[in-house]
Amino acid sequence: MKRLFLACAALTVLGACASTPATSAAPATPVAMTMPELTIYHLENRRSERIVWLMEELGMPYKLVFKRGDLAGSMAEIRKVNPGMPVAPTVTVGNEVLTESGAIIETIINRYAPGRLTPPLESADYAQHLIWLHHAEGSLAGRVIADYRVWMIAPPKERSRLVDSEAEYQFAEDYLGKHPWFGGAEFSTADIMMVFPLNFGMALNIVDKTQFPNINAWKAKIEQRPAYQRMLAKARPDGMVGALPALPKHAPSGPRTPAN
């Protein structure tokens, strides 16, 4: 009996003979860090609009630097702080210099606004939100820009047999047919990331915008958001600056044959 008692006492230390079942501790609520001065170096009608919009959605302070109507002048301002990689957006947070829209957004949310504009970590929406947040640049933007450049060199006679802009738009269209936002049930940073490449393809006639009613309905909701309207007033005060020429017509649609 004594040996049994000692064995159970030892196992109790390891949790094996505990009289009550062990319960996992609730995840600690993230605590927002104090945000240093945040400055957005901006080019009009470019991806840096995302960060202005994010800060307007969060209602957090920021400084916006650009030369109104002067893309070369705005780029010169970026080169002052980021000569090695002068891209928009470039953001300074205190002494840090940040690039890449998705990385900037995740840094700001995770450090200074934890839990905001993000589905709960344990929810079914969380992974989809994260997928779309990265899909915007990792897949969609690259396809759309590549198709635009190819068309400008030699207009295609038919759609690619591989994943192209139209297939990317259809993928987004199908998702929005089942969910109100790219973050699932609620607006999130995934929506902020997806606006630029979806607008790009439609505005430049890379795809036929009339084929995607779900995307158009989602865009209409986006454009009604007060924070989005404030972003346009601050980041695009003169409308479209330095816009690329639209294609004469979108590439012909039709059934794709499987790639070899």
Image: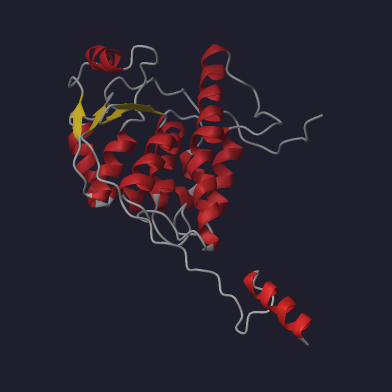
How far across and how far down the image is residue 235, in percent? 22, 32
Q: Depth check: 198 or 95 in front?
A: 95
Q: Depth check: 7 or 115 in front?
A: 7
Can you name the residue that lies furthest to the front here?
2
Can you name the residue that lies furthest to the bottom here?
1
How far across and how far down the image is residue 135, in percent? 53, 39
Position of 251 relative to 24 (above/below): above
How far across and how far down the image is residue 3, in percent? 78, 80
How far across and how far down the image is residue 207, in percent? 51, 34
Tell me the quarter of the picture where residue 196 sits.
top left
Can you name the residue that lies furthest to the right here?
260
Q: Depth check: 103 or 184 in front?
A: 103
Task: Please name the residue shown 55% across and 19% down the image.
Answer: 151
Quarter of the picture containing the N terminus is: bottom right
Task: Please name the residue shown 22% across and 13% down the image.
Answer: 73
Quarter of the picture containing the C terminus is: top right
Q: Depth check: 197 or 201 in front?
A: 197
Q: How many marks?
A: 0
Task: Please name the residue shown 54% across and 33% down the image.
Answer: 138
Q: Please state if 42 lies on the left or on the right of 101 as rendered.
A: left
Position of 223 relative to 260 (above/below): below
Colour scheme of the picture = secondary structure
